[in-house]
Image: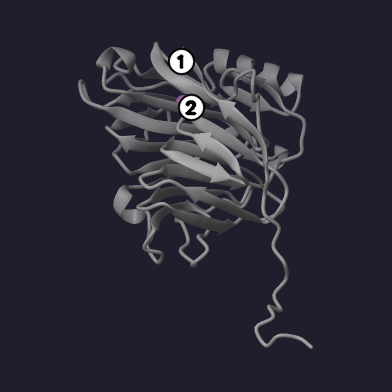
Amino acid sequence: MSSLNEKTDSKTTNKQVQNVIQGVRTSDGAGVKLTRIIGSQQLQMLDPFLLLDCFESDDPNDYIAGFPPHPHRGFETVTYILDGKMRHADSRGNEGVIEAGGVQWMTAGKGILHSEMPEQEQGLLKGFQLWVNLPKSEKMCTPKYQEFSAKHIPIDTKDEAFSVKVIAGQSDSGVTGPVVNLHSYPMYLDVMMHQTANFKQSIPSTHNAFVYVIDGQLSVADLAVSAGQLAVLGQGDSLELRAQAQSRFLVIAAKPMAEPVARHGPFVMNDYDELKQAFIDYQQGKFGCLAEP
Ligand code: CO
């Protein structure tokens, strides 16, 4: 005898936590203090994610020097600003300010030279930079930008216990983020819990995924994950966690490239020869130059 309420949809498998990573304090650019969460000895990469930095300070000495002109080739940089403002200018004549709540998804492709400088002399600057790899076929593509201010990032408020800013991918109640990416089909969610509650999100089983806790405390598959920690998720197609009220966290996932990685500093290619060529091209000025302000 079968129950009338028996579910007929296919079973989901909850993701377990493979590893919990604590970021490492370091500095980059012209001395910006930041926490490196992916791209350190503890977690060199989580294919296709090459780096995740969190910068957060209300002391101008920690950020004012910014990131003066530097090149990128072979991947994408994703800058998400929570507080403060960052001015961006590149060798192709693009310039703009990413304001609080805004995101810039830059496909560096064959190469750009750019600067990323705080557009403020005091106050809190807080945000993230994520590096996402490009497949071999796209590493030398023409650079492009997808930029969205806070008001162009939809917020899923269908569950009263939390709200989800959907930057990329789709929330479980069907809100789709504005970023389009046909290389790694990313998911980038910023989840704010308003009360102690469960949170559930499907994630394609093809994807590598992680949760990064910005504030508060989560219990993911019975494992405690606190502010400043990243939980690498294992196989499965669903994330289920319990969060304390006032928690905030990122859920980020993408399809791995499963290709060899040759990286050094701002260049990420497939082999050593391509990496060497990137340095030669840069030294020969092929990344262009930045107009003096
Ligand atoms: Co950069």
| Front residue (pair 286, 269) | 269
Q: Residue at x 61, y 44 (%)?
A: 222
The residue identified by callout 2 is 53
Q: Residue at x 45, y 42 (%)?
A: 249
| Quadrant in which the C terminus is drawn | top left
Tell me whether circle 2 and circle 1 mark residues in contact (CB < 8 Å). yes
Q: Position of residue 230 (x, y in %)?
A: 55, 33
The residue identified by callout 1 is 28
Q: Position of residue 72 (x, y in %)?
A: 54, 26
Regarding residue 160, the answer to whether it shows in the image is yes
Q: Position of residue 244 (x, y in %)?
A: 42, 46
Q: Is residue 249 left or right of residue 119?
A: right
Element class at badge 2: strand
Question: How are the colours assigned in the image?
Answer: one colour
Q: Is residue 60 left or right of residue 207?
A: left
| Front residue (pair 139, 149) | 149
* Residue type of the residue flagged with mark 1: Asp
